Image (cartoon, coloured by chain):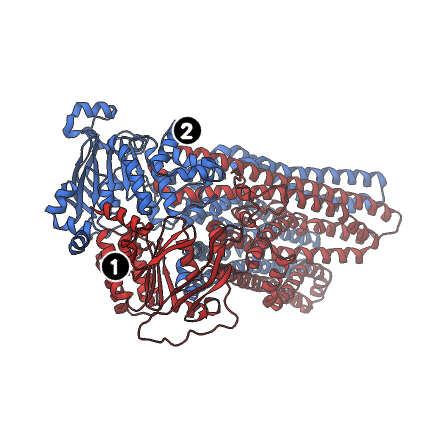
Chain colours: A blue, B red
Amino acid sequence: MTETRGDPARPRRRSTVRSLLRLWPYVRPVRGRLLAAALMAVLGSLMSLVIPLALKWMVDGPVADREPSGVWLGGLVLLVLGSAEASLFWARRALTARPLARVEADMRASLYRHLQRLPVSFHDRWPSGQLLSRATTDLMLLRIFLAFPLTFLLVNGVTIVAGFLILLTQEWTLGLVLLAPVVPLIVLCRYFEERYSQAARTAQDRTGDLTTVVEESVLGIRVVKGFGRHRGQERAFAALAGGVRDTELRKAGLLGAVWAVIMILPELALGAALVLGVMRVADGDLSAGTLVAFLSTALALRWPVESMGFLLAITNESATAADRFFEVMDSRPPAGEPASVPAPRAAAGKAGAGTAKAADAWGDEAAGLRLEGVEFRYPDAPADAPPVLRGVDLHIRPGETMALVGTTGSGKTTLTALIPRLHEATAGRITLDGQDIAALPRERLRRLVSVAFEDPTLFSATVAENVLMGAEGAGEPELVRALAVAQADFAHDLPDGTATQVGEQGLSLSGGQRQRLALARAVVGEPRFLVLDDPLSALDVHTEAMVEAALRKVLATTTALIVAHRPSTVLLADRVALLSGGRVTAVGTHHELLHGNREYAALMSGEPRGEEGRTR
Amino acid sequence: MTTSAPDQRTAEEEPAAGRTASGPAGTPRPGDPAGPTDSADSTDSTGSSDPFDKDVLPAPKGASLALLRSLLAPARWPVRIAVVVLLLQQAAVQAGPLLVAFAIDRGVPAVRRGDHGPLTLIGAAYLVSALASGLLQFAFVRITARVGQDVLLDLRGRIFRHAQSLSVDFHDRYTSGRLISRATTDVESIRELLNEGLQELIGIALSVVYVSAVLLYLDWGVGGAAVLSFAPLYLLVRSYRRRSMLVYRERSTAVASVIVKFTETMNGIRPVQAFRRERANEKDFDALNARHLKANGAAMLEMARYVVTSRLVANTALAGIVLWGAYRVADGELALGALAASVLYLRRLYDPIDRLAMFLNSYQSAAASLEKIAGLLAQRPSVPEPREPRPLPERTGGGPGREVVFDGVRFAYRTGGEVLPRFDLTLPAGQTVAVVGSTGAGKSTLAKLLSRFYDPTEGEVRLDGVPLRELAGPELRRGVVMVTQESFLFSGTVADNIAIGRPGATREEMERAARAIGAHDFITALPDGYDTDVRKRGGRISAGQRQLVGFARALLADPAVLILDEATSSLDVPGERAVQRAMGTVLRGRTAVVIAHRLSTVEIADRVLVMADGRIVEDGTPAELIAGTGRFAELHRAWRDSLV
């Protein structure tokens, strides 16, 4: 089943059946129920066939004979059959309701689980809207497919085959006439099926694009308004919405065509059989009764045949949904999954040994945070583009704070993402107290390294929960301390104090407030290694000074890497590393570099003359 | 025999898919026992009565219906045509059995007489009816699809345009997630109704009316009894409607919280992974997912319950009527043939009950969605476009700048809470004004009033003597442009994003703007230069680079008044310096308001305003203020110290 693993970017078009077969692992646990339900469906439709027969018998027999006891018996039989039919319908649904809801939920849970473990580079490529539609609409469609079309493809298929067997045994020549449209039907249906599934896929993708525009226009509303660009957005939206409409119409057109073909061809065959039958009855080859019986059986088959059209349509859409689901599921998390054995590079770092111990064993040279020949290239970058980082060597001693400085876009943020392995270095190695991070389970690594991002994201939870997620087992005292360090004491004055809901569904905080909470989150666990990406950019001068004072104490006890844009932030660090052209080109104290490195001096003071002018 | 077939489908088909996703939030109504679904899992800590906390915004009564009517108005004729087409199509379909009877009764004897005329006629009629039923079906599908899609296009456009026209203070309060779900999932549930529901409803109505009429025609007694049997069925449908509303509401609430959790995780994947939230998230997600599972199962079971009860009632009624009919046949009151026909038609009469439930489901969820959409559309922009816009006067003086006057302006949020007490302020044309002050001092509010993101509660803001309220949108944006801290990039190329400043600008003009602000170098270093798709590598254009693109955008727009709200916060020192150098030339002659935490920006200003608690507490040239003893002097000293 896994051999057809597709390329995540451009999936191969699989056959409908193949796509749907991949659902088996999820369906397996409920296969018994599903089978029982299918049986119920077969019995139910049998009942539906028997009830008219019973009616006919009653009308022809007891009623025609005016026989009251028979009438009562007939009524009773009808009632029993009717109740049985209703109960079977009920049983089928009741049997599958919860199990199928569970299949849907299981698939969603495993998608969620999988996505959480996919690397950040995957998420950079995939808009969350696309992922969400796979987790909701597509999975619901699959549940519906399992509940209904799957069963009835079987039931109707069986009915059709049985019906034709009856027809052929009754009168094989007329039966053959009725069978004549089967081949063209299959050919035409396949033709439409292909077209339809293409259209369905286009429609789903276009709807995704439309959703993206809607999202962006809402998220970027301040830009749109600030520049009065409603018209432009509207035009883009109108074009996409028009595109969605066109594909939907195309889908409808194809569906209509399938319907028409499926209605016309069998009907034509039936008409031909009727004319032929009448001729033969007239010739005396055939009794009128047999013709009537034959035709009424044929008519009874009309529904199962016609229903095939939309059953196949749903099946197709379900196959597309399954493709879209597996497209994501087939994307592999990078090597060295949390639960797996250490990666090949493990040989260097003695995996399993405690970091602190390792640090002692390896002495000062290995201790601390060390980067050796670290190279990084984005996985989807063009082959001829130079890597973002090409051979970064850097050693941060235990307890030391290192500032990372470089021009905008020099790869500072990228470098910080390599340490907690949000991105994987493409070459070279990074060691923490002598241990290769590639050999550490991510979970452990990320417990050792705490990060604050430039763009602070808060989750829909309380302030306390948001901060405390930085450390397991931390409580109120740690929370208060961390808030104090980050100068985020404003949290105590929120409506419910630190129990106030924040994030998308709660109170909205200013950029500076969010940044301070994110900082508190990074320091709450007193991590051994701290990575801060320009953590003070959104703070005003006053607050910044206070945060710096408090942060100094925290930094004294950890090994830290701080991305800095400003001298004030650099001054938090013991030493500074200059990142330039994908390499660390200079390491030293702020003053050493300020006087000895022209690039650094330019970076820190912008224009040297201005600096002098001010000091004068 | 054919009559029994469709009930398979009707009994089994699931309520449509889109409904389940009917929006991150159910259908809360004021005083609804189900409660505000939006915060169903969180303790609604603020406990405020702000209507924006709810999903359904207040809308005038009947707004949903009025909306529906206005959406369908242009489709009045296509809908009528569709009904006629379906009528004809049904007639063509029903002709089949009749032709069979005709062939046997008339055709056979005629052929025996050697007359092939009637048979040929019947064959031709069969051919025609077969072709007609197929082609009319095709036409029907096409027409209804067109109607549905046109309505959707209209609705999507309305929501989109409306959301765009609503003012920033609305967007500040009505979270983006909700707005997005209005435009996507809610529209989707209406799509479901239009796609399948409409067809169902017309089909059901036609078949019930048709069959009832035939039954009454066959026999008043049997027909009457059949019509009477609608009473218990009606009660069943009603009870189902009531009960299903509750389960579906629970389900949509449950799916909403699943969606919120999902989106939040994926959007915040960096912190999620960095802080090892995977396990905790999975636990939370599993709980939400389980709740959805339960609601989902309950909804399906509710449907099963309805199917079994309605079918029991229908089959009992059938048995009863047949029994009664049989007695009447025995008494000679009813012809045998009439009973036989009635019996077959009765089956057909009860077929659509189950389909009705499905229709009800998709109708209900669509109605809930429609209500939410109507509530959104009923929101009037608090910063409306002027009815009779005035143009800006011709520029006097050489520079591009214009004079700004805040005349008796006061600003308070609608919920109360004064942000800016009444004040007057005049910014002469061409002046560069720096606004400083600590967080919450009201600097950004001042900027938002000037850019007309908000309208003042009292007083007015004038640009060259013309109140901002009286300027049309495009005119206003030629006058005032604001660059904010969060420079959002839209999907498209870097060039597209710069061009937002002035659509139709040439590549040279864009490059000039980018060069002026120091963005040209990093842009050309991108894989495809100006044609690099930002969404594909959106995560890789750093915050500072995004701000530079935002700046280039603003330069290209070439406004009379430029507002920079923390627009350099993510830049490094050289970047900031480059921007400042550029501003020296760019801002010359332009009126500019610069808000910055970092005082380096202040040096290029002609004038500094220091704000505290919503008031302007100091006002003067930088030199004056630095020399003085006020807050600014103190701030400036602190900042100078931090530089070395």
B338 lies left or right of A281 = right
B214 lies left or right of A521 = right
Q: Residue B1 location in percent, x, y?
A: 68, 50
| Pointer 1 local density, CA inside 10 Å: few below 14, some 14–19, many at least 20 | many
A457 lies left or right of B49 = left
B396 lies left or right of B49 = left
| Pointer 2 local density, CA inside 10 Å: few below 14, some 14–19, many at least 20 | few
Which residue type carries mark 2? Answer: Glu
Nearer to us in this view, B518 or B308: B518
Q: Chain of mark 1?
A: B
Q: Is residue A59 above or below residue A432?
A: below
Residue B398 in view (yes/no)? yes
Q: Is residue A136 above or below residue A560?
A: below
Distance between the alpha carbons at the discs numbered 1 and 2: 45 Å
Nearer to us in this view, A293 or A81: A81
| Residue A402 placement: quadrant | top left
Local secondary structure at mark 1:
helix
Q: Residue B401 location in percent, x, y?
A: 34, 69
Residue A1 in view (yes/no)? no
Nearer to us in this view, B306 or A393: A393
Nearer to us in this view, B587 or A534: B587
Q: Residue extending furthest right?
A: B331
Q: Which residue is mark 2?
A: A476
Dot 1 and dot 2 residues touching (CB under 8 Å): no
Disc marking residue B580: 1
Q: Residue A484 location in percent, x, y?
A: 36, 35
